[in-house]
Amino acid sequence: MRGPAREATGTLVARWIPDEAGEEASLLASLGIPSVDALFADVPKKARIGRLGLSAGLEEPEVVAHIDKILARNRPLGKFSNFLGGRITSRYVPAAVDAILQRSEFYTSYTPYQPEASQGMLRALFEFQSLWVELTGMDAANASLYDGATASGEALLLCRRLHEGRRFLVPASLPWEEKSVLQNYATGPGLTLEEVPYDARTGNLDLEFVRTAVRSDEVFGMLADVPNGFGHVDEGLWELKSILGDIPYVVSGDPLALTVLEPPGEYGADVVVGEGQGFGISPSYGGPLLGLFACRKEHLRLTPGRIVGATVDADGAPAYTLTLQTREQHIRRSRATSNICTNQSLMALAFVVYASVVGPRGLAALQVSLAEKARTVASTLGSVEGILSPRFEAPYLGEFTIELKDSDAASFLEKLRRRRVLGGIPLADPRPGSPAGPARILVAATDTTTEKDIQKYARAARAATSGVSK
Amino acid sequence: MTFRQARWDEPSIWDLAESPPAEPAPAVPGLPERMRRKERLLWPELSELQVLRHYTRLSQMNFGIETVPYALGSCTMKYNPRVSEVLARRDGAANLHPHQPEASVQGALELLWRLERILSKVTGLPEVSLQPAAGAHGEYAALLMVRAYFLERGELGQRTEVLLPDTAHGTNPASAAMAGFTTREIASKDGCVDLTALRAAVNEHTACFMLTNPNTAGLFESEILEIAETVHRAGGMLYYDGANLNAILGITHPGRMGFDVAHLNLHKTFATPHGGGGPGAGVLAAGEKLGPYLPIPRVVKTGRKFHLDYDRPRSIGKIKSGYGNFGLDLRAYAFAISHGEAGLQHVARRAVLNSNYLGQRLGTSLPRPFRTLVKHEFLLSGTPLKARGVRTLDLAKRLLDEGVHAPTIYFPSIVDEALMIELPETESKRDLDEYAAAFERAVNDTPENLHAAPQRLAVKRVDEVRAAREPTLSWKDLRHRTPNHQKAASVSAPP
């Protein structure tokens, strides 16, 4: 073992690892040992390593300068006319939301295993669960999962607990990443995903396909998303329960959309999942996100994740606690309903604080305004030769899909980027060997989108499709 | 030091203001009437100050690292550096979309790449993916990789079993079951893996042995090289649960110990804040055998450019959206470069010193079940308290009244009335001494006081049985079942 690695006084590490007045020596003296080395006597010599091969530590100003230099190689969203959306948005977050997230009692706390010491977080999570219940029209929600895609994966597993079968139906239009995540949740129990084709004109689910599939006795569940992978609202979702019958029906819903759309609980959903990032969480290059999960009360004991419940304390006063824990891995181990331990509590707090600051009227107004803007974007791009916009004839909210007639999506978007336009998300699976398919791009209006941005997009798109590069 | 937590009679958020009157949600152009929300979202309209005051008051009824020492074993509750919070909120970090073209996120990719290289050195395993959202998520992804590996070799039909010690974290068997394996627990001997029992258990059905080292008893598995050889000779994989990595940073690493794949919890060892239960970040590091199966995309450097590589035909695919919890990766990177080579070793040495010192002090109050040379954490048994009619749970609640967080309790299950205690390197000697004094006061308090604890927090002992028996999980439940939560509560108050 190398010599003692204690840091010189006054360094950053010395601030973080206290050694006031040489307290390490005092700790060693209490233990009656000459050196910390003695505490590693149980690590066999053959298992020891020499150096890790890392650089020397830095001081705080150096850390800041170093990371700022790296971050300067990014061009954040505000430097562009930004039309990126999908499950992750770049909506403005009121400063009050982050003020709450920065309360160290919230962000530096652990899972509320001791409810008496954690009433603040438990109550906030109870309010979060309540909000997702109101948005979805379901009976109960959990205290969050990792993200929308993994929440869908957990929903798939719940469906299998509720119904026999090996096949899980998903829209062919579901984003490829979500299909890949779902496949990974299906793999363990040996289940398969089956893609439901969509109508070429509307992008809506082929309900006849679903009718045929459910007759096979092989289908144990189905997921449909609103808006769907093309950004559209599929009226077929309102028919699905009558087709599926007792086969569990999962809806993946966008929380902002659910402020103006009928809650899925009203049209037969058994589980409602979603991605909650759009409510008060910065996009942060895709993480941390927020997985939303709500279900019917009769299925509660088969569901994944932490759940907060209201109860009373020894004086009969209202109190909150994690509950129904016998479902969970720390008690049930290999027979748990999920392996989840860490969730996204702080992001759940952001979700409920954001919604409370913006308010129910403000949220719905925001969705209406995005929908209005999206229509302007769609019609403006529709006037560009070589672009079919919107590609599908179905209602939409803040997003829709365009299709390029003669260019490929990647080079089109790269040309736009050079003109400071982020033109949307290419829908094709980027893995080599995946079918090329049509050049489709998911385009979103954002709360920062202005008329000027829309015109800029159209100009850049014209230049890109006519082969003129900057 | 006398402690009292704030106790606000703060209403729930929906009781702070009337919700707007029932009315349909506003119409969206082009949206058929049938799809429209018939009643606007039921939620109160509040001023910004009302919202801030509400959640600030709630925060004051919650323990955090900046207010109290947080002795939860296996959770490694260390100081979360403030500088990382500032950096993660930079425009160039927070306001990046995962679908931006690569040319506009070169800094983000560079940061991920650099962190991967550091974590590769820390784990001694060449290939790293930052994609999993948490430790358990990393476990699950790794077991899918093990599965894919054996599937490709035509051995999956045979290798169906995951072995683990009876001290394993609950996530290990849960992840193994989700990945389609059966699990078998190996009984420990003196708190460590019983090598004889392991040798008897491994065979041609063994897919993987999952182990954390140091283990959940706080003990270093000194026979780790023999364990690795045993598992590998049977053709199985060795999995490293990195929850307890803090104790061995720069001393040894999973690669040197013979592990094939490891997950790390950046929210433990690398000091990213855990936010009341999450977010976390569960890095995966793999050796040559399993590396090709890591999730896609991988971050690669070509010349001076960074890009996302999807061309990994043996990859298991995606395990979540995006590329990992970037905001936490950035914080972990700041932590790693601040410490550097010597600093990370210093972390392990001081964490282990703290643990041994506190173990020695608390060992005078309650028995320590295994050997006393420990790593990041140690166990005590509350068994002697039973003679006074007191349980470990009572002691934990009484500790809260001292203004310190309780240890992890009733885990691992091989120890009766277990307390699992970890106060990592950022706790000073003074804090350790105060913790020890608080613990002694709590242990020596009267059974009446222990049963009645806590008394100084926002609420008294919480009735968890009632919560589970009559699940009340949302405002909707409160509205439907008990119009007035408060009133219902007082009806059932004990005499």
Image (cartoon, rainbow, N blue to C red):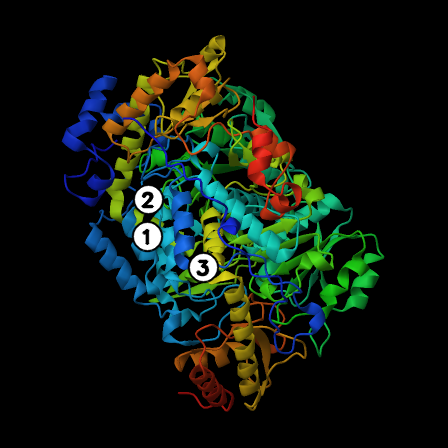
Q: Amino acid at mark 3?
A: Val
The residue at which mark 2 appears reads as B80
The quarter in which the C terminus of chain A is drawn is: bottom left
Sequence-first disc among 1 and 2: 2
Q: How far across and how far down the image is residue B160, in percent?
A: 65, 37
Q: Are marks 1 and 2 on the same chain?
A: yes
The chain containing the residue under callout 2 comes to: B
Asked which secondary structure carries label 1, the reply is helix
Judge whether B189 appears above or below A2 on screen. above
User: Is residue A135 left or right of A196 when viewed as pictured?
Assistant: left
Please report, as a chain letter, where disc 3 is located.
A
The residue at which mark 3 appears reads as: A357
Mark 1 residue type:
Glu
Q: Residue at x 34, y 65 (%)?
A: B92
Mark identifier at residue B85: 1
What residue type is disc 2 on? Asn
- Res. A145 visible in picture: no
**Residue B161: x, y in percent?**
63, 34
Q: The residue marked by circle 1 belongs to what chain?
A: B
Labels 1 & 2 near each other (Cβ < 8 A): yes
Which secondary structure, mark 3? helix
Residue B58 visible? The answer is yes
What number of labels is visible?
A: 3
How packed is label 3: few (under 14 Cα within 10 Å), some, or many (20 or more)? Answer: many
Q: Residue at x 43, y 20 (%)?
A: B395
Cα–Cα span, label 2 and label 3 = 27 Å
